[in-house]
Amino acid sequence: MTPALVSPFAGQGWVQIGEVLLAFALASSIGLERQMRAKSAGLRTQAIVGTAAALMLLVSKYGFSDVLGDHVVLDPSRVAAQIVSGVGFLGAGLILTRRGAVRGLTTAAAVWETAAVGMAAGAGLWLLALVVTALHFVIVFGYTAVLHRLDRRSHGAVSLEIAYDAHRGVLPQILTQITSAGWSVTSLTQLERPDPDLTAVRLELTGSTDTGALYGRIADLEDVRGITPVTGDELE
């Protein structure tokens, strides 16, 4: 029996166009977040992945209707499975190209998630696509704030303003003492000083809770002229 004749526009009407545009919009919103946070897979990458995933799923659903018949049966889920595998390779590349450092895991997961959002939009599951996109922003913004708070509680956090003699190479010595005391520098800001012979910096530190030992190491440096802890109110 020959396949039934179908319209050349079957499966590519306004509904399918809307599904592709939805995937494009949601993937772009995820990509914009990654772009604003200076991640490697930004707006263009995420938009392409999400839109392409939606198109591939639509091709799987509607692209073979002209060959279907009594003796031809196709499984539209097979392309979805291949998308999952293919995007996995893309995500792995984002991780492995970081000079051996284990970085980019969240970015790779975001690409995988974008593909899933595009697949859901292409499958007509627009509500699920919207919910997952909303959850993405809950994760990257809400969870980041929660993890930051937990990190500050599990590790000591302190902010210091340090003044020292200018042009004497003191800052590398200060950073060495901070590292030796078990602290890590999360932020360094140079401050304006009216005295041209002095340099001042503000350091955000996390690490050991023994601030006394930290102050002592820095104060012992010959060219350090002052150490001032900065409270949360002053930081704001």
Image: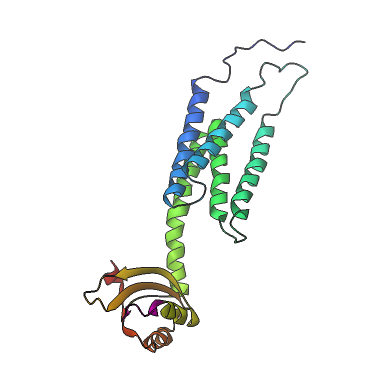
Note whether residue 204 is visible.
yes
- Measured as percent of width and height from the top left, residue 112 is found at 58, 45
Relative to 28, 229 lies left or right = left
Query: In front: 163, or 11?
Result: 163
Stretch in magenta: 163-171
Relative to 193, 16 lies left or right = right
Q: What colour-coding does the image apply?
A: rainbow
Query: In front: 229, or 150?
Result: 229
Residue at 50 percent across and 23 percent down: it is 15
Query: In front: 179, or 83?
Result: 179
Decide: is 85 above or below 76.
below
Quadrant of the image for the N terminus?
Answer: top right
- Measured as percent of width and height from the top left, residue 160 is found at 34, 77
Query: In the rendered picture of this protein, how many numbered marks are placed on residues?
Result: 0
165 is within the stretch colored magenta: yes
- Measured as percent of width and height from the top left, residue 182 is found at 49, 80
Residue at 34 percent across and 68 percent down: it is 189
**Residue at the outermost front position:** 167
Decide: is 32 above or below 184.
above
Decide: is 137 above or below 83.
below
Residue at 28 percent across and 78 percent down: it is 198
Decide: is 112 above or below 226.
above
Residue at 57 percent across and 40 percent down: it is 115
Note whether residue 230 is visible.
no
Quadrant of the image for the C terminus?
Answer: bottom left
34 is within the stretch colored magenta: no
- Measured as percent of width and height from the top left, residue 200 is found at 30, 75
